[in-house]
Image (cartoon, rainbow, N blue to C red):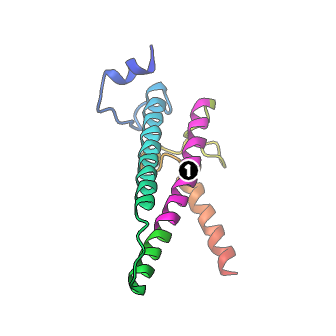
Amino acid sequence: MSTATVLAGKPEYRPTEDEEFMNERQLEYFKQKLLNWKEEILRESRETLTHLQSETENHPDLADRASSETDRALELRTRDRQRKLISKIDEAMRRIEDGSYGYCEETGEPIGVARLEARPIATLSLEAQERHERRERVHRDD
């Protein structure tokens, strides 16, 4: 059965905790979710590039120029964060291909459908993520 056939049966498919974890249908669902997210980011990046290239006007007013430069810097920082996000999406796609997607890097336990639905690039279970954040907080406070 092809993955297209798997999704064609139910267009509004949403993974649930009641089914086998990371079955073919869930993997295809998350793969499509990641691909759609990546395409959206790339589209926004193209729009930003077009906008930045078209906005080459020289503002005679110093305040207008400063505001424009601040907007441009913010937009570029946002794009840089999204570039890093694309690399995380690509890593998640590799995990789908190698069969490790959906499993915690730290414990090997399932991450959970709800967490993956909210953050499809997650690599840690909720419990492992909380432990990681507590350790970071302790080190930051020291």
What residue lies at 46% left-to-right and 52% top-to-bottom?
45
Q: Residue 7's spot in the image, x, y percent? A: 37, 24
Q: Could you say which quadrant of the image residue 26 lies in?
A: top left
The residue type indicated by label 1 comes to Ser
State the predominant SS element of the stretch in magenta: helix
Which residue was labeled with disc 1? 125
Quadrant housing the C terminus = bottom right
Find the magenta span and give its range: 75-97
Determine if the magenta segment contains residue 85.
yes
Q: Could you say which quadrant of the image residue 138 lies in?
A: bottom right
Q: Residue 124's spot in the image, x, y percent? A: 58, 51
On screen, residue 63 above or below 40: below
What residue lies at 65% left-to-right and 46% top-to-bottom?
105
Instruction: Check disc 1: other Cα within 10 Å, few if <14, some if 14-19, many if 20+.
Output: many
Q: Residue 123's spot in the image, x, y percent? A: 59, 48
Quadrant housing the N terminus = top left
For the residue pair 5 and 132, the one nearer the viewer reads as: 5
On screen, residue 45 above or below 91: below
On screen, residue 102 above or below 81: above
Determine if the magenta segment contains residue 131.
no
What residue lies at 45% left-to-right and 59% top-to-bottom?
53
What residue lies at 47% left-to-right and 75% top-to-bottom?
69
Q: Residue furthest bottom?
A: 62
Is residue 44 visible in this depiction of the protein? yes
Q: What element carries label 1?
A: loop
Is residue 20 visible in this depiction of the protein? no
For the residue pair 43 and 133, the one nearer the viewer reads as: 43
Left or right: residue 140 compared with residue 92: right
So how many labels did they put on this image?
A: 1
